Image (cartoon, rainbow, N blue to C red):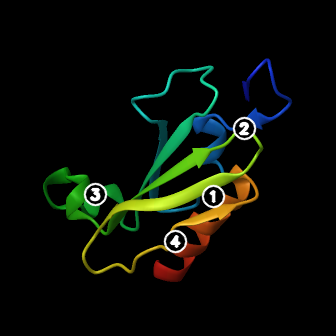
């Protein structure tokens, strides 16, 4: 877990966040502007509703895909938004929720509604 020594709030690492998603293909990483130990780490979840072998030419954007951004705040809240999606998929409304786990549950609900 991420720990900020000045606060009691803990943050999810990408590997722990990945366990909350059950899509056919998913990858969770830190934003390129974040470093381990940052006070406000932002997670990016890349999700495909198709298995890797079915992607045309093995390109992520040729699948039914979406990219979600989960920004974690020091008070424990998190903001989830969709930054990219396949044209056939519905949008996800930007939301601020009580925790990072709740944000990932919102992403999982979107996945379940569209698989």
The residue to which callout 4 is attached is 111
Q: On the image, which quarter does residue 47 sit in?
A: bottom left
Q: Nearer the viewer, residue 75 or 11?
A: 75
Sequence-first disc among 3 and 2: 3
Mark 3 surroundings: few (<14), some (14-19) or many (≥20) residues within 10 A: few
Q: Which residue is the extreme one toward the left?
A: 57
* Secondary structure category for the residue under label 1: helix
Judge by depth and name the residue closer to the eye, 66 or 22. Answer: 66
Sequence order check: which comes first, mark 1 or mark 4? 1
Q: Quadrant of residue 31?
A: top left
- The CA span between labels 1 and 4 is 10 Å
Whole-number angstrom distance, CA of label 3 to CA of label 2: 40 Å
Cα separation between marks 1 and 3 = 25 Å
| Image point (62%, 68%), residue name | 106
Residue 4: image location, x then y, percent: 74, 23
**Residue at which label 2 appears:** 74
N-terminal-most mark, 1 or 3: 3
x and y percentages locating residue 36 in the rendered image: 57, 20
Relative to 80, 12 lies left or right? right
The tag on residue 48 is: none
Separation of marks 4 and 2 at Cα, in angstroms: 27 Å
Say whether residue 28 is left or right of residue 108: left
* Nearest-to-viewer mark from 1 and 3: 1
Give the label on residue 53, or none: 3
Q: Nearer the viewer, mark 2 or mark 1?
A: 2
Q: CA distance from mark 4 to mark 3?
A: 19 Å
N-term-proximal mark, 4 vs 3: 3
Q: Quadrant of residue 13?
A: top right
**Marks 4 and 3: which is nearer the front?**
4
Under circle 3, the secondary element is: helix
Q: Is residue 9 above or below residue 77?
A: above
């Amino acid at each position: 877990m991420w720990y900020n020594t000045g606060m009691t709030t803990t943050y999810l690492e990408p590997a722990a966040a990945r366990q909350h998603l059950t899509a056919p293909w998913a990858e969770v990483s830190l934003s390129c502007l974040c470093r381990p130990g940052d006070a406000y780490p932002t997670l990016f979840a890349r999700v495909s509703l198709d298995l890797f072998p079915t992607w045309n030419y093995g390109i992520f954007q040729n699948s039914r895909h979406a990219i979600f951004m989960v920004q974690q705040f020091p008070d424990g809240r998190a903001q989830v938004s969709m930054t990219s999606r396949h044209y056939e998929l519905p949008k996800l409304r930007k939301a601020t929720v009580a925790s990072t786990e709740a944000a990932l549950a919102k992403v999982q609900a979107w996945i379940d509604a569209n698989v």
